[in-house]
Amino acid sequence: MNATLVLPELDTNSFWHDESGFVDIYDVPHFINTLKYDVRIVMSIPKITAQGKTKKLKAYKILPPRDAPVTWYRTTALERLRKYGAIYLTPFSHRLAEKIDDPEFQRLRCRVNYHALRFKPSIMKTSSDIANKLHSEGHFMSIHLRFELDVLAYAGCFDIFTPEEQEILLRHRNKYFPLLLRYWGKYFPGNTPDYRERRLIGKCPLTPEEVGLILRATGFDNSTWIYLAPGKLFGGKHFMKPFKAMFPRLKNHSMIRSGKLEENIRGLAGSAVDYMVCLLSDIFIYDGPSNFADNLMGHRLYYGFRTTITPNKKALARIFMDREEGHTSAFEERVRQVMLTHFGAPHKRIHPESFYTNPWPECFCQTKARNHADRCPHNSVNDVLESWFHNKEDVEVEATNQTDSTS
């Protein structure tokens, strides 16, 4: 499109109820500098002068299609950009197709996600201090549970809750997910499935106790240090009680005071700290897809193939249901047999695996590659480009001087 990017806005109010902007969370100078050879970035829409009056250029609002192909941006979006001078793309979650044939676009995604998007120094320092404190005790595991209001309401997993809690979930589902019955109709035409059916198709998030039982079955004991990346768990402390009994060394960012830990590390900034501590942990376990966990899984793969554990909820459901009915024979062995565990080894992405959870092969290179396209770039690409551009400018200046003297 050959367009200039205005610094992105964050949709923080709809979920976070947080006024933080992009500049409050991310290291903006680093973001602009890292991408300067890919796209020009400005802090805000410029002002224009027309008929002797100066005013701010107004951006034309466009709703991009979900998973839009590159051609949509090169035609529809570009036409509007030329017509109005500026366009405002919103919302922008999942608005560009994951599958793009041009590998350079995919590599740009990795430059953005894993290099350019760096949190502010205060967030990075807090995250590092917390990770260092946990590492001072040995190895530690981070967990991102999905036992949250919006996830439970969307999945319709109500039966294990009190009548009052079920009413809260039902109100939330009717308010935010009015098309839910159509969604479930794909699986169960004519009716809404009950809790048992939902569990059997892997749609209900694991309870904290079930996560604890999985960890026990796979060899972790009560000496394991665990960092909990909190979404706000639904249902009160009684759901966490069995997990804490199995794993008492449980921490989150509010429990680990890092010297002068900033009081404003909450909301979106708190989630940024959680993200970084999970990235730095020795093992990461998460229960089901989310933007947080999906991007983190790809990030951990990108930086050293770090161990990630993903429980297979569909395969585990029958085992947990048998246990609840008193059939506990060989429970741990059955859990071990079905656990889908990624130990960080690279593997080529296969459908329906997301690019964000596995950017292999586009964003990886080989130190001893036969094919030039597979070779690793210089450690500091920006330094190389800076040198190249400076050399180019010197040659152009010298050529101009020679032309002037000849004239």
Image (cartoon, rainbow, N blue to C red):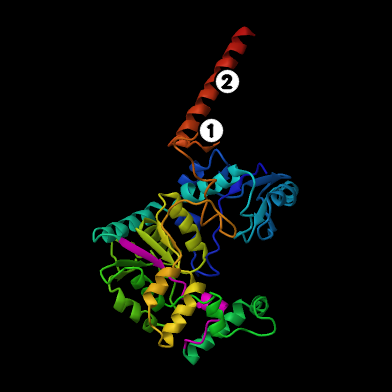
User: What residue range appears in magenta?
Assistant: 140-161
- At horizontal 54% and vertical 84% (from top left) the residue drawn is 195
Looking at the image, which is closer to me, 18 or 193?
193
Q: Which image quadrant for residue 170?
A: bottom right
Q: Which image quadrant for residue 107?
A: top right
Q: Is residue 318 above or below residue 75?
A: below
Q: Which badge, 1 or 2, comes first in the chain's sequence?
A: 1
* Residue 148 at least partly seen: no
Q: Disc 2 marks which residue? A: 396
Image spot of residue 156 (x, y percent): 56, 81
Q: Is residue 117 above or below residue 316?
A: above
Q: Are marks 1 and 2 in contact (CB under 8 Å)?
A: no
Disc number lying in front (1 or 2)? 1
User: At numbered mark 2, what does the secondary structure look like: helix, strand or loop?
Assistant: helix
Q: Disc 1 marks which residue? A: 372
User: At numbered mark 1, what does the secondary structure look like: helix, strand or loop?
Assistant: helix
